[in-house]
Image: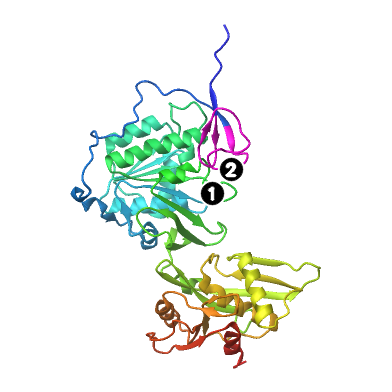
Amino acid sequence: MAQAKKKTAYFCRECGNESAKWLGRCPACGAWNSLVEEPTEKASENASVRRPGARPKPVRMTEISLEESKREKTGLTEFDRVLGGGIVKGSLVLIGGDPGIGKSTILLQVCRNLSNAGRKVLYVSGEESASQIRMRGRRLGAEPENLLLLCETNLSDIRLAIEEEKPEICVIDSIQTMMSEEVSSAPGSVSQVRESTNVLLGLAKGLGISIFIVGHVTKEGAVAGPRVLEHMVDTVLYFEGDRHASYRILRAVKNRFGSTDEIGVFEMRSEGLVEVMNPSEYMLEGRPANASGSVVTCSLEGSRPLLLEIQALVCRSSFGLPRRTAAGCDVNRVNLLMAVLEKRCGMDLSSSDAYINIAGGIRVNEPAADLGILLAIASGHRDFVIPEDVVAFGEAGLSGEVRSVSQTELRLQEASRLGFHRVILPMAGSRNLKTPSGIEIVPVSTVKEAIAAVTKKN
């Protein structure tokens, strides 16, 4: 007797849209060659899509208690900063990053701190055995009594364990290893990831459990699986940085309970991830003395000012088409700023290679870094040294003007705290500033004035 053919459907890897046949372009999100074929089966009759708990009833907004919005501190100030002040009850948080970047390490440290504070925590691992987790926990000093371990990939068993134990915090490491019996495709597929996340979402909202899920990333740096995964969760965090280097940067790209502009800086050591409470000083370590093409700028990451070193190397090109390379900033923005220098300041840069680097691995998208990039390129091109006690920030326009930026006083305080004495800033917005003691402000209206301000003492 011929075996019945399995039913299949095509799912988009980007948005999770389902199609009955293969299409070159997804009709929902427009992505090309993103549809993959996966087997589908109807859910069993006993399967329930209702979230656990009593049947929900609509209530008035004014009758909703705000006590549930109290945040739980994790014991890691940098982690709490990125979350928006702590863990929100019933939230679903996705953490992504390259292999070996420290996702499991920081979550185990968070579990340790919460368990030591008397919270009931469940750590579910689909990639490691219980003995492996304990070995890593012993190295990190994370062996508390209230920390429960479960090494399982079957989603039904995990759901039963969560409903029975009712932990306050749960960690799923990782979502790509989870497998639901209601879906016949392999673990890690679009269908499995979507179904597993949907079940965990129902548990988080229905039982009021805060759940952290670890997600693998693709070679492009995005979380593997359907793009709808990021839409389902409350918060998406990404670990950035070279895993061979010691620093790590935790950044929120989505946060329903806080700002997405905040970052957390950590250093990887033998005892785990250690918070960097003074990232400005950390980013400026090893800054060269009396070197051309180097200047310090102040960028704002959320409510935190960061002092960063901008380096520029400008040299004569050996080819007909000069190379322009930028690490840590947009290369198109660099090309625009070089055009401003050539047109408004008379610098011949059309036949020069330019290499721009933001030291420390931070990526800067704020326009306030424009003036620093301009001064670094001018210094590298004319080979003059910018004084080491100078900080420069401001947005540059196409006419060569320097425009004002936000939170000027906060930037001045950060420069003063680290021992800088001169700050070059936009003329607009420089009035009625509360200048810290020992700081000399140099207001400028144009890029020409800024270059003159750093060269008059050289």
* Residue 37 in the image: above or below residue 347: above
Image side of residue 266 versus residue 5, left or right: left
Q: Could you give the CA–CA distance between mark 1 and mark 2, rounded to whole angstroms?
A: 15 Å
Q: Earlier in the sequence, mark 1 or mark 2?
A: 2
Q: Residue 347: percent from the left, percent from the top?
A: 70, 81
User: Could one spot residue 292 in this view of the protein?
Assistant: no
Dividing the picture into quarters, in which one does residue 315 lie? bottom right
User: Which amino acid type is shown beneath numbered disc 1?
Assistant: Ala
Image side of residue 191 versus residue 23, left or right: left
SS type, badge 2: loop
Which residue is depicted at the point 46% across and 42% down? Answer: 229
* Residue 211 in the image: above or below residue 349: above
Mark 1, mark 2: which one is toward the viewer? 2
- Tell which of 97 and 161 is nearer to you: 97
- Tell which of 233 and 60 is nearer to you: 60
Query: Which image quadrant: the C terminus?
Result: bottom right
Q: Residue 438: percent from the left, percent from the top?
A: 42, 90
The magenta segment is: 10-36
Which residue is depicted at the point 63% across and 36% down? Answer: 24
Instruction: Please tell me how crowded label 2 is: few (under 14), some (14-19), or many (20+) other residues with Cα within 10 Å.
Output: some
Dividing the picture into quarters, in which one does residue 261 lie? bottom left
Q: Report the disc number at residue 31.
A: 2
Image side of residue 110 versus residue 324, left or right: left
Q: Report the disc number at residue 222.
A: 1
The residue lying furthest to the left in this view is 63
Q: Residue 222: percent from the left, percent from the top?
A: 54, 49
Instruction: Please tell me how crowded label 1 is: few (under 14), some (14-19), or many (20+) other residues with Cα within 10 Å.
Output: some
Which residue is depicted at the point 37% across and 61% down? Answer: 81
Asked if the stretch drawn in magenta spans residue 25, the answer is: yes
